[in-house]
Image (cartoon, rainbow, N blue to C red):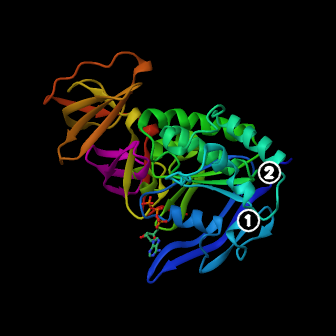
Amino acid sequence: MTHSEPIFRLEGVTRRYADLTALDQIDFVAQNNGYISLLGPSGSGKTCLLRIIAGFEKPDAGRVWFQGQDITDLPAHERGIGFVFQNFALFPHLTIFENVAFGLRNGETTVAEEEITSRVAEAITMVGLAGLEDRSPDQISGGQKQRVALARTLVLQPKLVLLDEPLGALDANLRDRMQTELRAIRERLDVTFLHVTGSETEALAMGDSVAVLDAGKIVQYGTPDEIYDTPDSSDVALFLNRFNLFDGRLESGTFTGPFGKVPAPTARANPKDVYAIRYDRTQIFDQGAPLPGPALPVRYLANEYLGSSIVFLFEAADGKTIEVDHHLSFGEPRELEIGADYVLSWDPAHAIIFGQEVAA
Ligand SMILES: Nc1ncnc2c1ncn2[C@@H]1O[C@H](COP(=O)(O)OP(=O)(O)OP(=O)(O)O)[C@@H](O)[C@H]1O
């Protein structure tokens, strides 16, 4: 099977609620057999887009294509697209086996009992729940419920599975484990996952590609590395929560910000002038030390350990909080004195500059 043909395609998909445009002429082509994260802030239209692809809602304009067929007017149950709900939506009065078998028993076509037994067993094994078939949903954990919800969808052998914040109801430890498992399960099947999340960490960790939705528009679509290294706009950079962003003024190849004037030989078109440097590329110096680039005077506030890294929080002269990420693989972090003055700097080649006056 070729992996280059699109599994689904959106063409000018628009959805309005009264005078609110929830989805604004979305064009999108999803390649087959991949893990796509759909990332966006609350209210950006993620659920709405998923419901339109699933067929639970109709667009006001535009078309939805699935495996080369226009399915815009096809009811949800005829689309052959799987949907995993955030709250799992299991039937409490049915066993795990019967929950997974439900779609096969109640589908358009009759499936022989023997085939139901073997397909359900296969799906349950796939998600690692063999042995729990006879339990009811209230006798299993949150993570296991999530797996039942997934098995119930996978047993129908869809080519596309839509997952609406599938890890949102799980605690942090379980979320990490399920991230790895979801990816592994998908890789074993010839299936595309479209995973909606509001968490940039989850989207970047899980997706082979990430689509960023903002105010009803897809503002960037690329690999996690592309999005992380080169956000297309200051809004995407802000939402990624990995960049210190400074307002300032870009004029004639120079950016003037709270760190003074710095050369800005290249910049990306943006509605406002913003200078961005990643948390993990921002370095801490004592006052008077030689610097690799701009100088931002700051006061040290606090730090926070995050497992593999430590985050240092500083306050700039204008009151803005600045973050520095120190990955512990680079060695022990230096000791800092709370309330003392330091200077932050960075290699200017790592900065991303966004400007209003960028010629196309
Ligand atoms: N049935 C509805 N009637 C009116 N407005 C709606 C309806 N459904 C969604 N909206 C609006 O459409 C916009 C997009 O909603 P949607 O639920 O898709 O956002 P989301 O990105 O999934 O947000 P969240 O992450 O908070 O779930 C929001 O402004 C929302 O208030």
| Residue 293 falls left or right of residue 212 | left
Residue type at numbered disc 2: Ser
The residue to which callout 1 is attached is: 79
Name the image quarter holding the C terminus.
bottom right
Residue sitting at x 40%, y 21%: 328
Residue 288: which quarter of the image? top left
Element carrying mark 2: loop
Q: Tell me the quadrant of ligand 1.
A: bottom left
* Left or right position of 347 against 303: right
Is residue 253 in the magenta section?
yes
The image shows residue 349 at horizontal and vertical percentages of: 46, 38
Query: According to the image, label 2 marks what residue?
Result: 4
Disc 1: CA contacts within 10 A as few (<14), some (14-19) or many (>=20): some
Question: Is residue 345 toward the left or the right of residue 215 in the image?
Answer: left
Magenta-colored span: 239-264
Q: Nearer the viewer, residue 324 or 72?
A: 72
Does the rendering let one see residue 293?
yes
User: In the rendered view, would you say 202 is above or below 219?
Assistant: above
Ligand 1 within 8 angstroms of badge 2 C-beta: no
Q: Amino acid at mark 1?
A: Arg
| Disc 2 + disc 1, Cβ < 8 Å | no
Residue furthest left in the image: 339
Instruction: Name the one closer to the observer, 330 or 98.
Output: 98
